[in-house]
Amino acid sequence: MTTSIAEFLAGYPPFDALADEKLARIAEASRIEDHESGSTIMNGFVDQIEELAVVVSGQVELWNTPDHKPDGPDEILGPGGVFGYSAMLTGSAIGPLALAAGPVRVYRIPGHTVRPVFSSLAGAEFLARKLTVAQRIDSSSINSYGTVSELLRTAPVVGSADMTVQQAAQKISEHHGGYIVIPVDDGRFGVLTDRDIRARVVATGSDLNQPVRDVMTFPAITAVTTTPASEVLVDILERGVTCVPVIDPRGTLCGVVVPEDFVNAPAGAGMSLRDQIARADSIDTLADRGRRMRYVAADLLRRGRPSFEVTAVLSVLTDAVVRRALEIVLPSRPDLDPSALTWLSLGSNARRESVLSSDVDSAVSFDESVSDPEQIAAYRAAFAEVGEVLRQCGLGVDLNGATADMPLFSRTHSQWRAVAGQWLESPLDNKGMILASLLLDGRPIWGDPGATAVSEVFRELRQHPGTMRLLLAESLSYKAKLRSMRDVLSRRGGTFDIKSHALIPVINIARWAALSVQSPEVGTRGRLAAAAGSAMLSEDNANTLVEVFEVLQKIRLTYQVAQLDHGESATDVLTMQRLSPLDRSLLGQAVREVSAVQRRMDNMSHYMSVKQWSEPEVSGRQG
């Protein structure tokens, strides 16, 4: 053990310049500590620090001020990160506060053993770097993973569907991977993990000699090598899987990724915060951790991460806050059954496109057992309390928007089915198209995801050509433009509503296009990709809109982070003079591109039937 400690320390400053005998003495005096997510590793503002700490695995969040405000850590340290030296060397209560961002292992080194290191040239250089380089985030400890292929480390452990569970368990043990991938003749894959074996075979007393095909997870969720790592991480978290086979575009197995592979990925800090949110034991703690979401997003943006990754992380964190708020509020009302409802996220959060100005829209679908008006009123009162918790967490909840405490957005499954059917038949009545658009973006995040009937009804949309045409007309009515008539009349030419005049037109096109090809995709980028090459949306136009959407979201997020830095509230109304010349130029070009696609789709709709809309684009047709 002493040898392994010495070998580890030798790879990081200031220990990498030490002679072997000095490293051996330090290693012999060191001890290992393991910490759970969210626990305090060190508080140099309260305790007298007599030891140095070195991160062995996981990530540690450091605060260099004693008030620990919810504005995110001053530093995030990965393996090899050193902390506690300032308080140890000076004997003063100058911090830091160190918290575990996920499971963490550290080495503790006594001060009397390690102080001489800082008297050496290597120690002086280490302190000089730390004291003169202002770093909000220790970027050297966080890798810039882009696609999931960059996370692959070893060859996958592969078995066969005919092998016994006992044989699979032996192979899993030999490779220390915790899983085995099972290729199937149709090109798909199954997965069996050691956790599956314990739960499905050992715990139930099943036969260890039964074939793997009887107990494996099939079909396994897979990811193509070019898939953004952040998207795969979201799948792992939201679907509760422990490993994802990675395949190349031809379907060949390349490897497997597991949750631990994402610890040092750029989104890792956000996922650590998600874990802390899920563990919040009170509303005050939840509010404290929820308010840190915006700073995680800002840090990701400053590291140059693509906007779709930033918004996906924000959406995952928002989901976590909503779930935890429900877990805290509903049990406090013993007359309510938490299992009798399905909570749907709506709007931008449902599409995983949350930004700093986004409101949290929601709806609820009740079991048929929830029929008493007084009981439903009690549920809605609880949902209003959840909304107040979300506001304390720094999330926007529009009092006049789509929220689960409103009668319009909380109904039983059968009531939702009935009203959705009415919207299909008469979309112009009772705000039918507006409500349909909201629910088409719905994503269940609590309860039975298959319980709601709304999505089933909307699958029948193509059987209502008149409604499809009205939805298209409604989608194209939000014109992409740099100035509205209201701007002209009010002489407010120096601002631009990036949401209303640029992003909503793209979102609407994507939503309608996905409907036209019967795609279940919810996100704007996924919807555009699914409909690319259809008669109404050429592949070139779809690709253009994907690029435009990314540009617009990046400008929007960058502007909102700057507002955050200035103590302002995030908004979608941009003051043009505050944008760089390049961003102003990109904004103008983006609006022109969206407007051109809108005109094309409007023209095409006049001489094509609804049936033709989803057919492949005619060869040679110009986009």
Image (cartoon, rainbow, N blue to C red):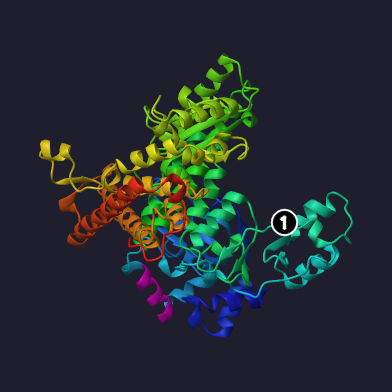
- Residue nearest the viewer, comparing 546 with 616: 616
Residue 211 to residue 66: above or below = below
Q: Is residue 509 above or below residue 491?
A: below
Q: Is residue 129 magenta?
A: yes
Give residue 495's position: percent from left, percent from top. Answer: 18, 45
Question: Is residue 138 something that shows in the picture?
Answer: yes
Disc 1 element: loop
The quadrant of the rendering that contains the C terminus is bottom left
Q: Which residue position holds label 1?
A: 217
- Can residue 45 be seen at all in this image of the molecule? no
Give the quadrant of residue 136. Answer: bottom left
| Residue 74 colored in magenta in the image | no
- Give the mark count: 1
- For the N terminus, give its image quadrant: bottom right
Span of residues in magenta: 121-130
In the rendered image, which quarter is residue 168 located in?
A: bottom right
Classify residue 493 as left or right of residue 105: left
Residue placed most toward the observer, 610 or 346: 610
Sort mark 1 into few (<14), some (14-19) or many (20+) by Cα contacts within 10 Å: some
Where in the figure is residue 493, as x and y percent of width and height? 13, 44
Q: Residue at x 87, y 60 (%)?
A: 210
- Check disc 1 and give the amino acid type: Thr
Q: Is residue 476 above or below residue 27?
A: above
539 left or right of 3 in image? left
- Which residue is pictured at 71% across the width and 64% down the height? 179
Please state if 161 lies on the left or on the right of 507 as rendered. right
Q: Main secondary structure of the magenta part?
A: helix
**Of 363 and 547, the residue lying toward us:** 547
* Residue 65 x, y percent position in the rendering: 38, 51
The percent position of residue 601, horizontal first and vertical second, equals: 33, 50
